[in-house]
Image (tube, coloured by chain):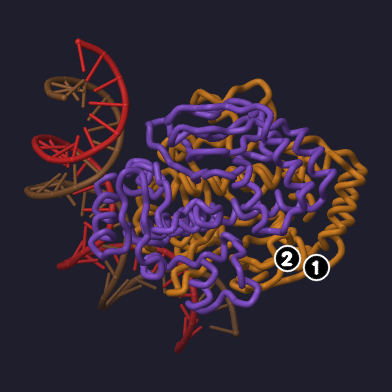
Chain colours: A purple, B orange, C red, D brown
Amino acid sequence: MVVYLIRKLQNFAPLSDEERSALQDLAGRRLRVLNSRDDIIEQGQKPGFVNLMLEGFACRYKILPDGRRQILSFFIPGDLCDLHNDVLGVMDHSIGAISPLRIAQIAADEIEVLMTRFPRLRRAFWWNELVGEATTREWLTNLGQRTGSERVAHLLCETFVRMRSIGLVDETGACPFPITQADLSDALGISIVHTNRMLQDLRAEGLIVLKGRSLQVDDLGALMRLANFEPSYLHLRRPGADEVGHGTEADREALA
Amino acid sequence: MVVYLIRKLQNFAPLSDEERSALQDLAGRRLRVLNSRDDIIEQGQKPGFVNLMLEGFACRYKILPDGRRQILSFFIPGDLCDLHNDVLGVMDHSIGAISPLRIAQIAADEIEVLMTRFPRLRRAFWWNELVGEATTREWLTNLGQRTGSERVAHLLCETFVRMRSIGLVDETGACPFPITQADLSDALGISIVHTNRMLQDLRAEGLIVLKGRSLQVDDLGALMRLANFEPSYLHLRRPGADEVGHGTEADREALA
DNA sequence: CGCGGTCTTGAGTGTTGTCAATGCTGGTGG
DNA sequence: CCACCAGCATTGACAACACTCAAGACCGCG
């Protein structure tokens, strides 16, 4: 399952066999299995490990005193949580499982050893962190500027493209999608009812098929247009990416 | 003007005279002066320098193809922009001046030399970055979960507390505040008209006086309660902060 | 004194939220 | 194998918060 991390990092730079097997070792240590809705770590706790997602979906979220919940990001296989948060000492948010989960718990110093031995991996991890921050900024833009339907479409685009970039979209254009409508609502800052209605619209337009924890995107181009989705913030490299720019709509489709 | 950076970093750890003078040197190099509304760096450009805010306000923002603008963060004196963004190569957002501005442009390798010489400064810079990320997450929560009035109140709380932590609130409880209502709207994801009305409400309640580019907070406790503002994400240390926790309302006031 | 940018206010509209009920589905135990 | 249950999805009716449009006031600056 480390293959997803490797695929992801290779969006930044190709990795050597040695680097790949070092990553394999790293992730083979402490395996942790969680059920849907379990917390990996809670607000207020001190982070002990870096968590590497092996299988399943999770999310970062924050609970307000009155119970409102904001989901801050979704984690899919290959994602690393909180590479550096030991500096602050205390978690200001929680991380919870959305589906049944398998994660590897990695000690901070193990990562440090790895990064010292392989400078390219250090840069790859950094790149990964920065992409995460860029994604948070895009979410902020999503919540601040886009309408309900655009928000839903945008999040679906992002998740779909990320899943595809690690090879989890099958030949029919479908990928696992265990995120419930309640989760979507808490991520997008709209009510459950409204989320449901926006999804209906997307279905009615023939853009997506969403059912049984699976998302199939039938017209990615249209979905992207509807959302104003511009994938460059994900910094993905796909075959031929060097040949295309970032400006035109054709570029956008090519990159996505 | 480097004093603001020093004050800020000392929220993380006390600095030695040597460290302080090294920071002073660093910031004395390339001075850049900008007018209100000038851009420091634009979306699509390659970042050249790390920018240190000496005087004035700035903001990070993103423009959508159709012209909508989302402000992602505000910079006040002492703030460092984009310590590490050279890894990604291209800016996915712009940074613009809100008021007349004086900044120091620092080369990435100068920072690296400094951090190697003073490991504590390295950790302090890291801490600073992580606080920035925590703040972005708080903004996401603000946009996703809070109503218009809460959002406005929350942003005022945050800005006021940050200004106070670097010594820019005077004895009357007022601080410079060059952010226009249009800027606030783009930061909070609400319309200008609505922003205006929410501000009127806060004035009517006697919580703030906002006029002439100056913000005076008359009842911070009430403003914080209204906003559900919980300042721990800013990780500020004030005198006695070691003695208080983070849970109760009294703690919150003490820390803020 | 005039001008541009900013702020304020009113009126009407509509997107989105709330409440509440019902339907669906996959898993569990008898 | 069926009945039941819990969680999730869907729908309708109504309310409200927030948006748009539009006009006018204010204020600092040249």
Circle 2 sits in a helix, a strand or a loop, which is it? strand
Q: Image quarter for residue B38?
A: bottom right
User: On the rendered image, what quadrant is the N terminus of chain B found in?
Assistant: bottom right
Q: Quadrant of the C terminus of chain B?
A: top right
Task: Please state the chain letter of the residue tagged with numbered disc 2 in the rendered image.
Answer: B
Identified by mark 2, the residue type is Arg
Q: Is residue B220 left or right of residue B4?
A: left
Q: Please tell me which residue lies in front, A54 or A202.
A: A54
In this orientation, does residue B239 appear? yes
The residue positioned 45% from the left and 42% from the top of the image is: A71
x, y percentage for residue A90? 62, 30
Residue at 61% x, 38% y is: A52
Element carrying mark 1: strand
Residue displayed at 66% across by 68% down: B90
> B187 or B111: nearer the eye?
B111
- Image coordinates of residue B191 in percent, x first then y, are 37, 62
For mark 1, name the chain: B
Does residue A80 lie above or below A235 as drawn? above
Give x and y (percent) for residue B12.
74, 37
Q: Kindly identify the residue that appears in the image at 90 percent across and 50 percent down.
A: B22
Determine crowd level at label 1: few under 14, some 14-19, many 20+ residues with C-alpha closer than 10 A: some
> Sequence order check: which comes first, mark 1 or mark 2?
1
Question: Could you tell me how far apart the alpha carbons at marks 1 and 2 are, in whole angstroms?
Answer: 7 Å
Q: Are marks 1 and 2 in contact (CB under 8 Å)?
A: yes
To the question of a shared chain for discs 1 and 2, the answer is yes
Q: Is residue B12 left or right of residue B38?
A: right
Q: Is residue B53 visible?
A: no
The kind of residue tagged 1 is Leu
- Label 2: how many residues lie within 10 Å, few (<14), some (14-19) or many (20+)? many
Q: Which residue is mark 2?
A: B102
The numbered mark at residue A195 is none
**Number of the label disc, if any, that sits on residue B31:** 1
